Image: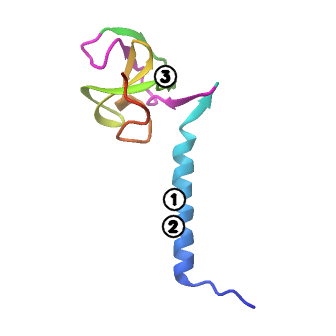
Amino acid sequence: MAIEETAETVATSDAANATHAAIATEAADVETTAGAITYPTAPGYQVNVRSGPGTNHRVVKVLPYNTRVPIRCQRHGEKVSGPYGTTDIWDSIAPGQYVSDAYVRTGSDGFVTVPCG
């Protein structure tokens, strides 16, 4: 018995393959290192790490170029524009250490983890 492939089946299959390819590309930006998911900072930037979610908080350190960061939790703060858009989301990468989500490639315009308590 021959199986007939219709144009609808091919289109559906092509759309599914394109979706899987996009997910795989996005997933390639997320790495798991020693059990922690990390995200890349914007290429070509040394990102300021601040003591709180805004540019009025002191700089506690500067991340080198091409750094990957874990995101422990996220919170709203000062709106910042960067290579990944304008956002008021700040990523906590360690206790008392925040970077603007505008400089971290999370693949999302919203939270990718739990809100900070």
Q: Main secondary structure of the magenta part?
A: loop
Above or below — where is 103 with respect to 58?
A: below
Mark 1 or mark 3, which is nearer to you?
Answer: 1
Magenta part of the chain: 35-57
Query: Residue at horizontal 46%, vertical 30%?
Result: 43
**Label 1 sits on what residue type?**
Thr
Question: Which residue was labeled with disc 3?
Answer: 65
What x and y, as percent, mark residue 99?
38, 22
Side (left or right) of 102 relative to 70: left
**Numbered mark located on residue 97 in the image:** none
Instruction: Quote the CA–CA distance across marks 3 and 2.
Output: 36 Å
Question: Which residue was labeled with disc 1?
Answer: 19
Splitting the image into 4 quarters, where does residue 91 fall? top left
Side (left or right) of 97 relative to 82: right
Mark 3 or mark 2, which is nearer to you?
Answer: 2
Instruction: Quote the CA–CA distance across marks 1 and 3.
Output: 31 Å
Other-residue count near label 3 (Cα within 10 Å), few / some / many at <14 / 14–19 / ≥20: some
Query: Residue at horizontal 55%, vertical 69%?
Result: 14
Q: Are marks 1 and 2 in contact (CB under 8 Å)?
A: yes
Please name whichever residue, 7 or 113, is drawn nearer the observer in this view of the structure.
113
